[in-house]
Image (tube, helix red, strand yellow):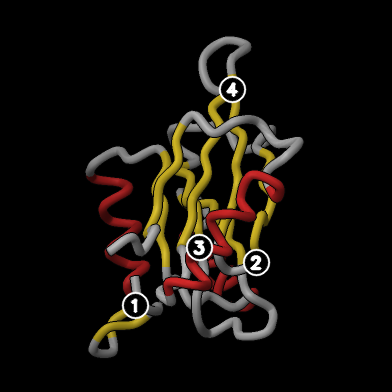
Amino acid sequence: MRGRYHKGEDKWMRINQLVREKRIGIAAIQETHLSPDDVEDIHKLFGKRLQVYATIDPASPQSKGVALIVNKELLPIEQIKTKSVVPGRALHMTIPWHGESKLSILAAYAPNDPAENAAFLDGMEEKTRGLAKPDISLGDWNMV
């Protein structure tokens, strides 16, 4: 995403439009650069449809960032559970799915630096211990 704005336009207007028109239930976005105030603003603007779950790096909230966006018109949000696995880098979500089953999602934005990337990936197993095994693991893993 590389931040909230592009040429003065709020990218969340387009995200809201895509979620509505394409009937997207859950979307994952990396490099959100969202502060807690930004998340609050998004909920004020698009709270009828969008619920944003974000992990923010408290040391630098205007960089990094991962968000899972839920379309409240399609999915119930009351029983969603999220955990910031690595602040600003990895977010885990468990959401009720069909019947009694649950869907587990891990969204990530791995570091670009090869050494930091390796440490990030090596630490994921320990940091996700106790969480539901992801049914879906997605994001920008920076594996080049």
State which mark lies toward you, 2 or 4.
2
Residue type indicated by callout 3: Ala
State which mark lies toward you, 3 or 2.
3
Residue 24 lies in quadrant: top left
Q: Secondary structure at mark 4?
A: strand
Mark 1–mark 2 Cα distance, whole angstroms, equals 24 Å
State which mark lies toward you, 1 or 2.
2
Identify the residue at image location x=34%, y=77%.
Answer: 10
Residue annotated with mark 3: 118
Residue type indicated by callout 1: Asp
Residue type indicated by callout 4: Lys
State which mark lies toward you, 1 or 4.
4
Residue annotated with mark 2: 87
Q: Is residue 72 left or right of residue 124?
A: left
Q: Secondary structure at mark 3?
A: helix
Task: Indicate whether 128 appears above or below 52.
Answer: above
State which mark lies toward you, 4 or 3.
3
Specify few, some or many for label 4: CA neighbours under 10 Å numbering under 14, 14-19, or 20 or more. some
Q: Nearer the viewer, residue 63 or 78?
A: 63
Identify the residue at image location x=28%, y=56%.
Answer: 17
Q: Earlier in the sequence, mark 4 or mark 3?
A: 4
Residue annotated with mark 4: 102
Q: Position of residue 41 (x, y in %)?
A: 55, 73
Specify few, some or many for label 1: CA neighbours under 10 Å numbering under 14, 14-19, or 20 or more. few
Q: Earlier in the sequence, mark 1 or mark 2?
A: 1
Mark 3–mark 1 Cα distance, whole angstroms, equals 34 Å
Residue annotated with mark 1: 10
